[in-house]
Image (spheres, helix red, strand yellow):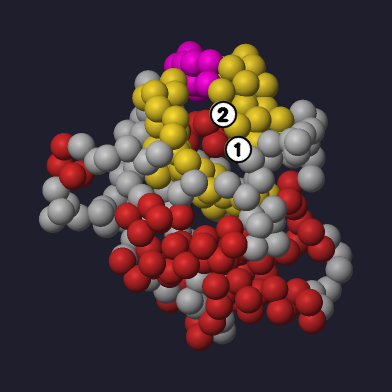
Amino acid sequence: MTEPVVEVRDAVAGYDDRLVLRGVSLSVDRGEVVAILGANGSGKSTLVRAILRLVPLSGGSVTLFGDPRFRSWERIGYVPQRIGAGAGVPATVAEVVGSGLVARRGVLRVPGRRDRAAVAAALDAVGLADRARDPVASLSGGQQQRTLIARALAGRPELLVLDEPTAGVDAASQAAFAAALESFAAGGGTVLLVAHELGPLKPLISRCVVVHEGEIAHRGPVPAPAGHHADPDHDHVHPHAPEQTPGMWGA
């Protein structure tokens, strides 16, 4: 039996004096697409940040790829909550995506043919191949978010962690996200996805967990929407309250 890609046991974490996670356990196997769902402030983003060691645990443990002292971060692609790839970045779309190769390639090695091919493939996967030479600041918000996903994909990760990648972006970008994740998972990749609503990503989900007030309230199939989210006319393209996020380049 293979080791889980992610193994969280009795995780306790928070910010300053505010406890957010209260003994959370979660396991993600290789090849799964697991969604972490929950309302704003439920602790779902804190959970993935704790998994990536961006938030320290005060109790419990996290093991990645069977290693409790995991340091091979090039095996993980991380896309934080929507922050805008173009904010203060005088670079082309291809240059931003290419920066995702640094962890695997090293800072000093000059990008080669294989690196350029990886950038091209990642841009094609998110539907931005025709914008490679454009300034990233010239893209729409949804296209900038697609650029950050392409950046994560370019590094050829084994695990892709996404924190609300479709929140507040257009329908075309949501469809592009879904296609890119479907291709990644079909190639054997593992996905851990934080979401408030799944939209076009729902058919890709192997399993979901629902976080409520810092605890796991549900494990299994995606639950049916309730309240105004069950309304077929509900607009799924809207912003959500931001939680504390890292710098744009992630972990």
Amino acid of disc 1? Val
Q: Is residue 148 above or below residue 28?
A: below
Q: Estimate how packed mark 1 is, as few (under 14), some (14 to 19) or many (20 or more) residues with alpha carbons within 10 Å.
A: many
Q: Return the residue nearer the eye: 118 or 27.
A: 27
Residue 45: % across, % down: 47, 36
Q: Secondary structure at mark 2?
A: strand
Asked if residue 211 shows in the view, the reply is no
Which region of the structure is painted magenta? Answer: 14-24
Q: Which residue is mark 1?
A: 28
Which residue is found at the position 49% from the left and 46% from the top? 206
Q: Position of residue 185 (x, y in %)?
A: 58, 58
Rounded to the nearest whole Å, what is the CA distance between mark 2 and mark 1?
A: 7 Å
- Say if 171 sits above or below 213 in the image: below
Left/right placement of residue 206 relative to residue 115 reads left
Asked if the residue under mark 1 is in contact with the one under mark 2, i.e. CB atoms within 8 Å, the reply is yes
How would you rate the neighbour count of disc 2 (Cα within 10 Å): few for under 14, some for 14-19, many for 20 or more? some
Type of residue at label 2? Leu
Residue at point 50%, 77% (across, down): 128
Q: What residue appears at the point 46 percent right and 49 percent down from the top-left corner? A: 205
Residue 138 in the figure: left or right of residue 110: left
